[in-house]
Image (cartoon, rainbow, N blue to C red):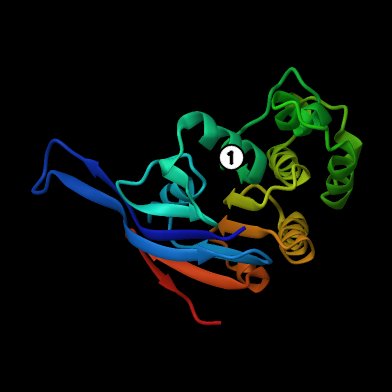
Amino acid sequence: MTVKAEGVSKRYFRKAGGANYFYAVQPVSLEIAPGGVTVLTGRSGSGKTTLLNMLCGLLRPSEGSVWYDGTDLYALDDKVLSRLRSGQIGIVPQGRSAVDTLTVLENILLPARLYRRPLPEAAAVQWMEKLGIAPLRDARPTELSGGELRRMAIVRALAQEPEVLFADEPTGDLDDENTRLVLSAFRDYAHEKEKAVFMVTHENDALQYADRVYRMDSGNITRQPG
């Protein structure tokens, strides 16, 4: 599945100042292709997360459109959009996203259980082993470190085998070794399963795992060489 953004922007109105609105993201056009990792870099506050949220269906653009193959994402009604997100889009958010009353494995399988899909337990165990959290399958989130919680969220997204995987600063809580494990997992997932991966990060280590790189500055995006 290919994701295309055409003239996508996000602007917010404000009550004070010289202009009555400002652009968090200037008009952007880009393509996220299957079989590769697309990395978006830039400083904090440059608009990276806002763009990611528009691309994955969580935030309606002020202008422009987002296409998933031949489907205009924001022309869908809420129910159809929710079904598409649950079945074909994986998201690794920045913040904490665990349910404390469930075990690690139950948290990972929760999306499939909520939407009454077959539980991807074999895939979940495989990714848990790759990312070093298999011994924690029966632990509760309150027993985990920040890095372990982050890897749990990554496994939850990967185990669903989405067509497009979005990851927002996925290595922010991780040490060097686990950063390499996660970045390698994203690359392997994209290349071996012919899926699209879009990752927002400010860490330079991610660039060597990318098939294409964009940079965002003050809401403006530019394609980087290489």
Query: Callout 1: helix, strand or loop?
Result: helix
Identify which residue, 84 or 205, lies in the foreground.
84
Across and down, in percent, residue 127 comes to: 83, 48
Quadrant for the N terminus in the image = bottom right
Q: Name which residue lies at 74% across and 61% down.
A: 180
On screen, 204 above or below 150? Answer: below
In the image, residue 223 sits, relative to residue 65, either above or below, namely below
- Where is residue 28 drawn, in percent x and y? 36, 62
From the top left corner, tell me how far across and down residue 60 is, in percent.
38, 41
> Is residue 171 visible in this depiction of the protein?
no
Q: Nearer the viewer, residue 140 or 54?
A: 54
Label 1, residues with CA under 10 Å away: few <14, some 14-19, many ≥20: some
Residue farthest to the top, as pictured = 101
Residue extending furthest toward the front: 70
Q: Residue at (82%, 50%) from the top-left corner?
A: 131
Q: Quadrant of residue 27?
A: bottom left
- The residue at the far bottom in this view is 226
Label count reads: 1
Query: In the picture provided, is 57 more to the left or to the right than 93?
Result: left
For label 1, the residue is 85
| Left or right, residue 46 beside residue 192 | left
Residue 92 rendering spot, x and y as whole percentages: 62, 44
Residue drawn 50% across and 65% down? 31
Amino acid type assigned to the residue bearing label 1 in the image: Arg
Quarter of the figure with the C terminus: bottom right
Q: Residue furthest left?
A: 18
Instruction: Please give the name of the residue rendered at 63% of the width and 32% of the height, measured from the top-left corner.
Output: 97
With respect to residue 55, does 194 lie above or below?
below
Taking 101 as reference, is 68 above or below it? below
- Visible residue check, residue 174: yes
